[in-house]
């Protein structure tokens, strides 16, 4: 006597071929036809489009008109590179609407200024004391900031030199 499962109206034995055909039929059914899937898809797309539009708006937002753009100041003297004598004169191109220039000199990649001076012109002559702070064999960087009459920084120039 064999141990075959009982066959009746509610029990039907499915062969591997039948199972394979049912799986193929399930795979061939179209996806995404339910209303819930459509709503979720539309919501996701709306979110992506909204994020894109918001990002575009924020990026295109104009700069604050009360704060002027910072211009590049061309440094003239001392020239960048190795100098054979300690520089005494610092000069840069002037820019319009500047009421004050601020010159700062520090050791290359240092964290504190050795010299800070303000002037209304585009040239500064260092004092003997200031020149004495620059040592032979040292590397220095200098920066000039242009300030408007309102105190805004409207220009900046950088250079470096070695002695």
Image (tube, rainbow, N blue to C red):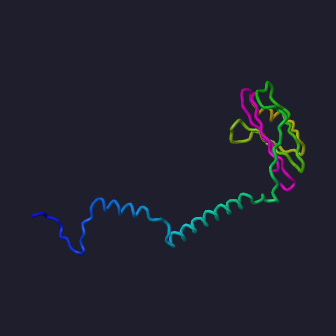
Please identify the residue farthest to the bottom as the structure is shown: 9
Q: Position of residue 54 (x, y in %)?
A: 68, 63
So how many labels did they put on this image?
0
Quadrant where the image shows the C terminus? top right
* Res. 10 image quadrant: bottom left
Q: Which residue is painted at 77% across and 40% down in the image?
A: 158
Image x and y of residue 103, in percent: 81, 42
Q: Nearer the viewer, residue 117 or 71?
A: 71
Q: Out of 17 and 137, give the one closest to the viewer.
A: 17
Q: Residue at x 81, y 26 (%)?
A: 85
Q: Which residue extends farthest left? A: 1
Does residue 59 show up magenta in the picture?
no
Q: Quadrant of the N terminus?
A: bottom left
Residue 13 visible to the viewer: yes
Q: Does residue 126 appear anywhere in the picture?
A: no
Q: Residue at x 35, y 63 (%)?
A: 22
How far across and down, in percent of the image, does residue 88 sit? Answer: 84, 32
* Dominant SS type (magenta): strand
Above or below: residue 30 compared with residue 155: below
- Would you say 12 lies left or right of 92 here? left
Quick check: is 159 in the magenta stretch? yes
The magenta stretch is 135-163
Which residue is nearer to you in this view: 16 or 156? 16
- Relative to residue 5, is residue 57 drawn left or right? right
Q: Taking 121 as reference, is 137 above or below it? A: above
For image coordinates 89% across by 46% down, the residue present is 120
* Place of residue 68 in the rendered image (x, y in percent of width and height, measured from the top left): 82, 54
């Amino acid at each position: 006597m064999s141990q075959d499962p009982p066959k009746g109206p509610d029990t039907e034995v499915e062969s591997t071929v039948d199972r394979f055909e049912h799986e193929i039929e399930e795979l061939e059914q179209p996806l995404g036809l339910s209303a819930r899937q459509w709503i979720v898809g539309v919501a996701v797309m709306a979110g992506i489009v909204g994020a894109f539009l918001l990002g575009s708006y924020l990026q295109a937002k104009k700069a604050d008109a009360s704060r002027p753009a910072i211009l590049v100041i061309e440094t003239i003297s001392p020239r960048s590179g190795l100098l054979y004598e300690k520089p005494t004169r610092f000069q840069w191109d002037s820019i319009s609407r500047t009421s004050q220039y601020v010159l700062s000199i520090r050791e290359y990649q240092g964290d504190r200024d050795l010299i800070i001076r303000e002037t209304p012109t585009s040239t500064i002559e260092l004092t003997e004391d200031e020149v004495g702070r620059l040592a032979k064999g040292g590397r220095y960087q200098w920066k000039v900031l242009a300030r408007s009459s309102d105190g805004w920084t409207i220009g900046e120039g950088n250079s470096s030199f070695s002695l």
